[in-house]
């Protein structure tokens, strides 16, 4: 398979929603993998006036590296440092009304994304695509649903008054009132 064909396949499978993919970067990544012996050049061809295309296949070393990578990512939890939890940790810096407004906007976007993944699941099911090929879609659907549920609960707590919000201008600096004790606990838990 040549790099542009790989790119087209990734887009057709909607895997460009998992990783940012650009044809040029993919081409350079393929060359680096070939240089490391993880891919092997199996042929070159040219159609008309188009540039020559190099076709690659996975080597045995490449297959081993792939299996090792997948097994590690599936078995070892890692913090991927997504931006949303950082924003949640800092949203106390916004007035309550603004928090509600921006989270409402996020919900609209998340629900659209959830609908898209629901449509993908329905399409995969309709064509009887072997389920292991689209488990990532089910996972993303579940994660989106969980985030939507969490935000809906938070908004309900804010709107009902169960969660009391302080105006950012009247907040106490918690750096001296024990917040650092929480980080000590978090670091102890991470090293256990």
Image: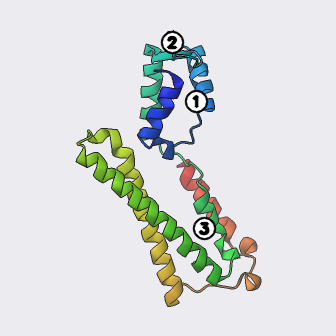
Q: Are marks 3 and 2 in contact (CB under 8 Å)?
A: no
Mark 1, Cα crowd under 10 Å, few <14 / some 14-19 / many 20+, is some
Left or right placement of residue 26 versus residue 149 in this view: right
Per the model, the C-alpha gap separating discs 1 and 2 is 19 Å
**Is residue 40 in sight in this rendering?**
yes
Depth check: 123 or 153 in front?
A: 123
Q: Nearer the viewer, mark 3 or mark 2?
A: 2
Residue 119 point in image, percent of width and height: 34, 55
Q: Residue at x 42, y 64 (%)?
A: 146
Determine the residue positioned at 59% across, 36% down: 22
Residue that label 2 marks: 45
Tell me the residue that label 3 is attached to: 88
Q: Which residue is label 1 attached to?
A: 26
**Residue 165 vertical position relative to residue 8 in the rendered view, above or below:** below
Q: CA distance from mark 3 to mark 2?
A: 52 Å
* Residue 147 to residue 192: above or below: below
Helix or strand or loop: what does disc 2 sit on?
Answer: strand
- Left or right position of 72 against 166: left
Q: For the point 50% across and 42% down, which residue is it?
A: 16
**SS of the residue under disc 3:** helix
**Residue 121 position (above or below residue 174):** above
First in sequence, mark 1 or 2: give its number: 1
Q: Quadrant of the N terminus?
A: top left
- Which one is earlier in the sequence, the residue at label 1 or at label 3? 1
Residues 182 and 74: in front is: 74
Distance (Cα) linking label 1 and label 3? 33 Å
Between 145 and 113, the one lying in front of the other is 113
Q: Position of residue 75 (x, y in %)?
A: 42, 39
In the image: residue 134, left or right of residue 72: left
Q: First in sequence, mark 3 or 2: give its number.
A: 2
Can the viewer see residue 72? no
């Amino acid at each position: 398979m040549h790099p542009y064909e790989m790119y087209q396949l990734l887009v057709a499978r909607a895997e460009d929603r998992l990783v940012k993919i650009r044809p040029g970067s993919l081409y350079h990544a393929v060359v680096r993998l070939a240089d490391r012996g993880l891919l092997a050049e199996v042929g070159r061809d040219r159609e008309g006036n188009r540039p020559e295309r190099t076709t690659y296949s996975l080597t045995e070393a490449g297959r081993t590296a792939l299996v090792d990578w997948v097994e590690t990512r599936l078995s070892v939890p890692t913090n991927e440092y997504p931006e949303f939890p950082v924003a949640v940790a800092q949203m106390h810096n916004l007035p309550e009304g603004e928090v509600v407004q921006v989270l409402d906007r996020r919900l609209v976007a998340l629900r659209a994304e959830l609908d898209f993944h629901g449509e993908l699941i329905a399409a995969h099911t309709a064509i009887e695509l072997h389920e292991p090929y689209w488990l990532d879609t089910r996972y993303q659907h579940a994660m989106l649903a969980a985030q939507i549920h969490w935000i809906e609960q938070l908004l309900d707590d804010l709107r009902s008054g169960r969660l009391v919000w302080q105006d950012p201008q009247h907040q106490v600096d918690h750096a001296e009132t024990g917040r650092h004790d929480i980080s000590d606990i978090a670091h102890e838990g991470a090293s256990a």
